[in-house]
Amino acid sequence: MKASILILISFYSFFISSCIVPESTHIAPNFYLLSHSNFDENYTASKILNFKDLNKSISSNAFYIKQVELPFYLDDSRIVHRTDNGKIRFFENERWGEPLEEGVGRVLGANLARALNSHFYSVFPHRKRNGVHYDISISFDRFERVSDREILLKGSWELYSKDFREGVHPLLNGQEIVSVEINEREAKNSIINEVHALSESLNVFAERIASSMSSVSKYSNSDL
């Protein structure tokens, strides 16, 4: 009898302990988005590209940004650091809130539209709008934090135009290297400051494309 009672008690204890759910160690990830620049539109238009006197430039600068090409290691939702001798580090709990190539295209499109004083534009994955005059291809080799205080953007771009005489044809291309210092005083979260610096590098990249496009736009508008 006593043996039966002991067996029942042991079974009951085992059953109760098996129902206890251990405390979860899961950490919810943080998600981040790149943002377009808040630079002064009047300054950009008049001081950098001199588009104030180009009244016809608004429609003639209509553009479409194709899908941004990224290296395989950046085609990931996790934020990446690449600092020591080519080593890369993925942050499991620090992630992008959208596919990185789409975020890059979105921000470049907004910054380039401001710089060109043109609201006629579209960006992949959205469809190309009617009346687009320029197609822009963009490819990145680097886009990450490279040290405690710096991020690096290294990429290339190609500008294509379409007309009735020549069809789609290349006009310009360029390779850009942009490094931006991370301002650790902006926020307590170091990743937020890093994302701000990456966003600023896209602003610089867009301004360089726009500066190159300005000569083409001036030339085209001079014949109108």
Image (tube, rainbow, N blue to C red):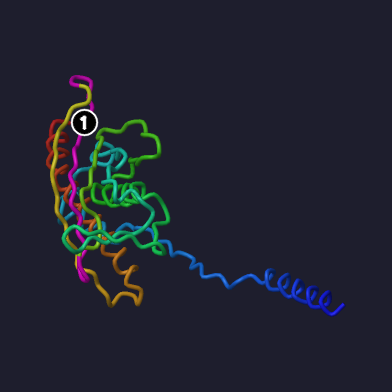
Q: Name the residue under label 1.
A: 161
Q: Answer above or below: position of 166 versus 182.
A: above
Q: Give the range drawn in magenta.
A: 147-166
- Label 1 crowding class (10 Å Cα cut-off): few <14, some 14-19, many 20+? some
Q: Residue 55, located in which quarter of the rendered image? A: top left
- Type of amino acid at the residue the image marks with label 1: Ser
Q: In this view, does 223 lie above or below 16?
A: above
Quadrant in which the C terminus appears: top left
- Is residue 190 one of those drawn in magenta? no
The chief SS type of the magenta part is strand
- 186 with respect to 148 (left or right): right
Seen at 60% across and 72% down, the residue is 22
Relative to residue 49, is residue 130 drawn left or right?
Answer: right
Where 16 falls versus 114 (above or below)? below
In the picture, the quarter occupied by the N terminus is: bottom right
Residue that lies at the very extreme toward the top in this rendered image? 165
Residue 108 in the image, given as x and y percentages of width and height: 28, 50
Is residue 152 rendered magenta in the image? Answer: yes
- The image position of residue 171, as x and y in percent, is 14, 33
Whole-percent x and y of residue 180? 19, 64
Query: Which residue lies most toward the bottom here?
Result: 2
- Which image quadrant is residue 35 in? bottom left
Q: What element carries label 1?
A: strand
Q: Give me the residue at 24% from left, 57% from top.
A: 42
Along the horizontal axis of the image, is 69 left or right of 93?
A: left
